[in-house]
Amino acid sequence: MYQLDDTSYIYAFALLPLLWLGFLWVSNWKKKTQATFASSKILDALSPNRSRFKPFLKLVLLTLGFSCLVIALINPKIGTQLETVKREGVDIVFAIDVSKSMLAEDIAPNRLEKAKRLVSALLNDLASDRVGIIAYAAQAVPQLPITTDYGAAKMFLQALNTDMLSSQGTAIDAAIDLSSTYFDDEEQTNRVVFILSDGEDHAEDGTIDAAQRANALGIKIYGLGVGTEKGAPIPIKRNGIVESYKKDENNEVVITKRNPQVLTSIAESTNASYLDGNNTQAVLDFVWEELKQMEKKEFEAKKFVSYKDRFQPFLIAGFLLFLIDVLVFETRTQWIAKLNLFNEKDAT
């Protein structure tokens, strides 16, 4: 596990091609200038210790030194400690209605956005509880399994929309049954489901049965109703502009209303409560008090908690390479010339 402290210095590597191009241009300029002054044999006689390899060696040293200094500025960090963090909390599943009726704008900006903002506010108040997200319309689909990553929860939450499920309707029983599968820890004593919906239900007969099955598993289901009982039409928009409103088979505009009775019945079946989700602060206060009274289960979560700077070796290597570059002259070293490491003996 690693991370880079300041990636803006990566652009400094763009100077390396300019360095090499400058070296090639200077080398070519030297050859042409020397050729106008004397032939290569005369130059070898005048400067017998001139090395053909060391200018290139100095360039390589300069390149490596510069690269090491840039990496030191970027400051790579490596995670060196994997700590086990013990947490206590409650498992919470948010089942969010994404049927078309949630587009009604009787609560600003619309019911679905209100529900998403309410869940986001609840996430901000949680500390070490685990959360999961389910989206449902005519069927229920898992969005996020039980996790302590609230950042991921908010990301999946923002992605919810009424177009994500092709089949429309509102089957709260499917959402309840799916949420029951999220609690796979038999030792977890408190299991909580929040259903955020306008309460319209197209499977009322099976909803109470599903709630009773959940209650047998020790799951409490709280209903959070969004919208108004007066109701509102369902807008059909294109590019954010209302073109018309949804109509029924008689070509009458459909008015969708919040139905608190359904959500209240579900909550009462699991010894929980129904709340008006339009009042965000009241919901936050109630949930805080409820969770505070619940028994918490201890569980463990592992994560990297410590990163150490690793710029020091690169900084030292960079300065050493620059020092070597300064100490290396463009003439032959006598003992290296005797070893003929660079095949330069034939040039003498």
Image: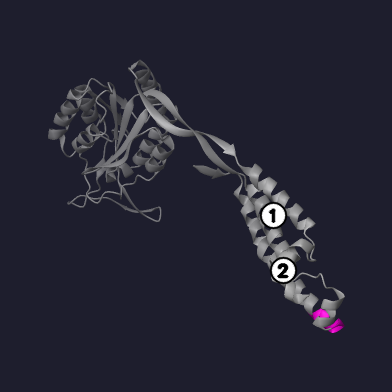
Q: Is residue 241 above or below residue 130?
A: below
Q: Given this view, does label 2 or label 1 mark the residue nearer the observer?
A: 2
Q: Quadrant of residue 202?
A: top left
Looking at the picture, tell me which residue is in the foreground, 307 or 321. 321
Give the position of the C terminus as an image quadrant: bottom right
Q: Which residues are magenta?
A: 32-38
Let me know if residue 324 is in the magenta part.
no
Residue 34 falls within the magenta-colored stretch: yes
What is the x, y in percent for residue 66?
69, 55
Q: Nearer the viewer, residue 255 or 268?
A: 268
Q: Secondary structure at mark 2?
A: loop
Q: Report, in whole angstroms, how far the alpha carbon at label 2 lies from the one at label 1.
A: 19 Å
Is residue 150 among what the camera can see? yes
Tell me the element at label 1: helix
Residue 237 location (% of width, % of height): 35, 53
Type of the residue with mark 1: Gly
Against 67, residue 302 (above or below) is: above
Q: Mark 2: which amino acid?
A: Phe
- Residue 191's place in the image compared with 181, above or below, is above
Q: Is residue 58 left or right of residue 191?
A: right
Give the labeled residue for mark 1.
65
Q: Which of the labelled discs sits on residue 53, or is there none?
A: 2
In x, y percent, where is residue 68? 66, 51
